[in-house]
Image: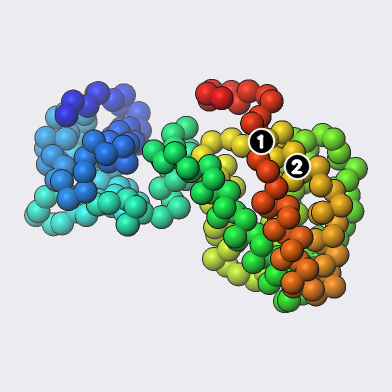
Amino acid sequence: MTFAPVPRVSVSDHVFGQLRDAIVSGRYRPEETLPGERELAAAFAVNRHAVREALRRLQQLGLVRVSQGDATRVLDWRVHAGLDLALSLARSADVLPVETLVRDMLEMRACVGIDAARLCAERGDPAVTAALVRAADEYGSLAPDLPRMDEANIAIWRLIVRGSGNTAYLLAFNSLLAGTFAIGDVPPDARAAELLDVAGHRRLAAAIEAGQGAAAVRHARALLTAPVTAPTTPVPGRDA
């Protein structure tokens, strides 16, 4: 396999990115061995330290197994990788080669959000609940400005996830948000059905304030499973 020589600035980032993409795209299959450090350094025209750092990061993502004094073996990312792989790809304007990724990540968002709403209602942190009710009351004043409603929607869900008291949900929420669902942008107008449901956001906040877990689940599900439509505005740098 031929690799492109890289600039001398952040060389380990370039080595890491090219090897990561080669593994995720299937050019290197699970259980295949990568070329040795010396061979990779020559192919990328970098020093071995940059290659070693790139391999370390690949191992942290669950893409390879580096054995001391042995070959570096490729792992199956579907078995060993976590959300940090999707986040790494999103930061480089790339995505996992999975056709259903948009659907899959939005389904995960719904699962986390629905159960977080239930827990937030049942655990009832008064400070979070009060802030949530205020945020929901103010939410309607932003309509029909979808970009501003999108920002306010994120703030509302951050309060709900925080109020759930579940650290794993909070970390998953942060990963989804930081990676823009790890799929690139989902424009606000594609989620207009969810964002413009002002009454639904207020019903959700009211259910959580009242400690009604079942009602919170119902209202959260209605919001988070609202239809996602084709965007009417283009996303810069992406195909429609």
Classify mark 2: residues with Cα within 10 Å, few (<14), some (14-19) or many (20+). some
Classify mark 1: residues with Cα within 10 Å, few (<14), some (14-19) or many (20+). few
Q: Amino acid at mark 2?
A: Ala
Dot 1 corresponds to which residue? 229
In the image, taking residue 134 as reference, residue 20 lies left or right, namely left
Colour setting: rainbow
Query: What's the residue at 12%, 41% (across, down)?
Result: 36
Element under disc 2 = helix
Distance Cα–Cα, label 2 vs label 1: 9 Å
In the image, taking residue 110 as reference, residue 205 lies left or right, namely right
Query: What's the residue at 21%, 40% (across, down)?
Result: 28
Mark number, residue 193: 2
Q: Position of residue 130 (x, y in %)?
A: 85, 65
Residue 81 falls in which quadrant of the image?
Answer: bottom left
Q: Position of residue 102 (x, y in %)?
A: 53, 42
Mark number, residue 74: none
Using the image, determine if residue 66 lies above or below residue 4: below
Residue 126 falls in which quadrant of the image?
Answer: bottom right
Using the image, determine if residue 198 lies above or below residue 237: below
In the image, taking residue 192 as reference, residue 48 lies left or right, namely left
- Cβ–Cβ below 8 Å for labels 2 and 1? yes
Q: Position of residue 14 (x, y in %)?
A: 32, 32
Query: What's the residue at 14%, 45% (across, down)?
Result: 33
Asked if residue 165 can be seen in this view, the reply is yes
Label 2 or label 1, whichever comes before in sequence order:
2
For this rendering, which residue is in front, 190 or 148? 190
Q: Amino acid at mark 1?
A: Thr
Using the image, determine if residue 229 lies above or below residue 124: above
Using the image, determine if residue 55 lies above or below residue 4: below
